Image (tube, rainbow, N blue to C red):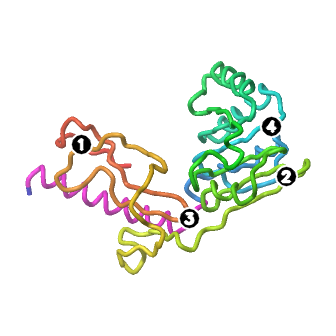
Amino acid sequence: MTASSSSNEMNRRQFIVSASALTALVMAGPDIARPGQTAHALTEPAALPPDERELRGGLAVWIGSEEPAPQWAQRLFELHDRHGVLVMGLHPSAEAVAEAREHLKQRGVYGEVSVDHLNEASSAGIPLIDESVNLLVVEEGSPFSNEEIERVLTPLGVAAVNNGGAWERIEKPWPEDIGEWTHYLGDDTNNAVARDSRVAPPRHLQWQAGPLWSRHHEHMSSVSATVSARGRLFTILDEGPRESQLLPAAWK
């Protein structure tokens, strides 16, 4: 066996071991991938209802109303700072949006935390695509219905809606027409046919993830063995140098 073929065999074995461990991780349940990422701290600054559900990354959106812009911007900053998620603020006041932007720029987080004007044309609907928000906070005075709020939530996403000073919790159930892909070949029967009836030709970009550039591989792609369960994606990813396929791999 040559040195090159020996190296390829070692990489192949490492990949198989990683794939087996990844499958075990997914099948063990969705709450072990990012331990400790709970949303309990949200109850302190925002007076949200107690909710120990894990905030598992993604996008958090806060629709403001009468709260002064500096305090509102600070809540957006704290939400990002505690959980590391992307945060978007929407506000009906253009002046509040401008003031909040300046506050966030001074904190050095604008981009990961952003704000936009919720103009009158938005009253018919939240200006976000379907199933894009993991956590939605809606302050009192919002014109949006529960149906519209649920539209933008991801499956298992949570909204906290302030109704007369009391917070109502809305959780979007897992849709029956969205399947899961928990193993390298679909499920534990190795039947590589998805049980998902919603899949169709893509019409828009839902979200984007790395790597931005792939490596050149003669036998294996940069992203391998993608599986999905309960709204989470797991992949085995080669982040090795792109300059040459002869350089060592860096599987993660």
Q: Are marks 3 and 1 in contact (CB under 8 Å)?
A: no
- Judged by depth in the image, the label closer to the viewer, 1 or 4, is 4
Q: Residue at x 8, y 53 (%)?
A: 2
Q: Is residue 251 left or right of residue 67?
A: left
Q: Is residue 87 left or right of residue 201?
A: right
Q: Mark 3 or 1 closer to N-term?
A: 3
Q: Mark 2 or 4 closer to N-term?
A: 4
Give the residue pinned by disc 3. Answer: 230
Q: Residue placed farthest to the bottom in the image?
A: 189
Q: Residue placed farthest to the front in the image?
A: 121
Q: Amino acid at mark 2?
A: Trp
**Element under disc 3:** loop
Please tell me whether residue 233 is drawn above or below residue 97 in the rendered image: below
Q: Residue at x 55, y 56 (%)?
A: 33
Q: Mark 3 or 2 closer to N-term?
A: 2
* Quarter residue 191 falls in: bottom left
What is the number of the mark on residue 65? 4
Q: Mark 1 or 2 closer to N-term?
A: 2
Q: Residue placed farthest to the left in the image?
A: 2
Q: Amino acid at mark 1?
A: Pro
- Judged by depth in the image, the label closer to the viewer, 3 or 4, is 4
Q: Residue at x 75, y 51 (%)?
A: 144
- Judged by depth in the image, the label closer to the viewer, 3 or 1, is 3
In the image, residue 61 lies at what x, y percent?
67, 43
Residue 12 falls inside the magenta stretch: yes
Please tell me whether residue 92 is drawn above or below residue 194 in the rendered image: above
Q: Amino acid at mark 3?
A: Arg
Give the residue pinned by disc 2. Answer: 167
Q: Amino acid at mark 4?
A: Ser
